[in-house]
Image (spheres, grey):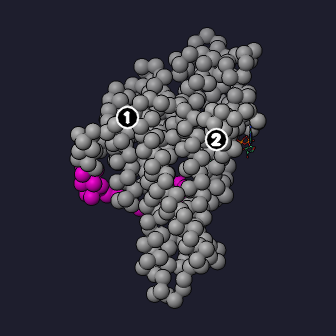
Amino acid sequence: MTHTAQDTADLEAYRGQVRAWLAQAAVPEVPLDLEGRFAVLREWQKTLYEAGFVGISWTRAAGGQGLSPSHQLVFSEELARAGAPQPIGLIGVDVVGKSIETYGLDWQRQQLLPRLLSGADIWCQGFSEPESGSDLASLRTRAWIEGDEFVINGQKVWTSWAHKAQWCALLARTDAGAPKHRGISYILVDMSTPGVTARPLVQMTGDDEFCEVFLEDVRVPVRNLVGQLNEGWAIAQDTLSHERGSYTLRRRVEYEVAVEEAVQNLRGHVGATGTEPPDRVLEQLGRSYAAVRALEALTRRTIDRQLTGDIPSPYDSVDKLSLNEVEQLLYTSITDLLGPFRLAADRAPFGLDGPRWVKEHYYSRAASIYGGTSQIQKNIIGERLLGLPRG
Ligand SMILES: Cc1cc2nc3c(=O)[nH]c(=O)nc-3n(C[C@H](O)[C@H](O)[C@H](O)COP(=O)(O)OP(=O)(O)OC[C@H]3O[C@@H](n4cnc5c(N)ncnc54)[C@H](O)[C@@H]3O)c2cc1C
């Protein structure tokens, strides 16, 4: 896909609009604790939505702005460079919402998506189960039809934000006799339905951001089905593609800002305090900088794939694997600058915001797990891009 001079001029004009808006916006301070962070970022999502900055590349019919993925990228870049946070409902906006936009019924698009974009409704993704993570197609949550309702029974796990969510995009087995990739349906579940229980689980960051979710005789209208009965696997692949590809675009910009900030901290403090980081740590930070730049080049290709509709694609796995490797290298590098002050992060050297970087470092460990582990991404790349034999 070639970009014309007109495209570039449009994007730069848009960048100007975004900068002007951000310059006058009341950008919130984000508390580190989960409850505070959730409340502030939900309100921030509403502000961004009302200003036309959520769902930028979504169709207007679904409540979006009808612009291109490149406009979305420009916005994300400017948001991060202004030190402003992302909205909270990204599982909805970047991941499941896009699949509903593509495969959903008219009522789902019209009634659910504008509320998803504004943050009025928070969404979660009910895919993984205790015995079905990497081998997702083996999932055992069952749903059957009685009259005009599904009756759902089963258990999900690691469901991010389930305790805060109003809606869940759930995978359930609707034909137990079919081969495992068939017989799965993609069903939208109102989390306030009787029989749904979300029990929070604490992560190593100290936050209980994800949950186990129990479903006991949960009755959901049949019109909440997305796509065709028993054909939810293809839609699940679309959702995972967004999680592996689109999400990388947003995260990449945050890494760019993080590495620049760490470098600025070092420039301002090294020598002044008589303390210098070891060469090994500086070298690692340099490699992080190069890796963030390489990820930028990769995400340009992701934009092109989105523009040409080349999703889902095994290249989503290249994006996800790269995101994971860059994120872990970067946050390890920054926390290595803290040295022993990692244990007393509030007294961090070089003017670094210790508590924040320690938390980012802990969270980065999850990057090689969520959205499919790195081993699974490598399997996909090996088999589907490199043509290597299975196993
Ligand atoms: C922070 C976080 C948020 C999450 N949020 C959600 C969410 O919102 N919704 C949701 O549905 N899920 C979510 N997950 C779950 C995530 O998708 C699963 O953890 C992931 O798919 C791995 O599944 P598992 O944990 O069952 O590990 P397993 O599948 O049991 O894997 C265990 C280990 O075996 C390896 N392995 C398994 N199969 C293979 C294979 N074929 N080849 C090579 N190695 C293999 C894996 O790479 C891994 O190292 C989240 C996870 C995390 C960490």
Which residue corresponds to the image point at 34% horizontal and 54% vertical from the top-left?
Answer: 78
In the rendered view, tell whether residue 10 sits above or below residue 36: above
Badge nearest the viewer, 2 or 1:
1
Residues at marks 2 and 1, CA–CA distance in whole angstroms: 26 Å
Q: Report the side of 379 relative to 346 (left or right).
A: right
Q: Indicate the quadrant where residue 191 lies.
A: top right
Instruction: State the residue position of label 2.
Output: 377
Residue 321 part of the magenta-drawn span? no
Q: Position of residue 156 (x, y in %)?
A: 68, 36
- Looking at the rendering, in which quadrant would you find the N terminus? top left
Instruction: Pick whichever, 289 or 18, lies toward us.
Output: 289
Instruction: State the residue position of label 1.
Output: 1
Among numbered discs 2 and 1, the one appearing first in the sequence: 1
- For label 2, count other residues whose C-alpha is less than 10 Å away and answer few (under 14), some (14-19) or many (20+): many
Residue pushed farthest top? 147
Label disc, if present, on residue 342 of the rendered structure: none
Q: Which residue type carries mark 2?
A: Gln
Instruction: Pick whichever, 199 or 68, lies toward us.
Output: 68
Magenta residues, as a range?
Answer: 16-36
Q: Position of residue 216 (x, y in %)?
A: 70, 28
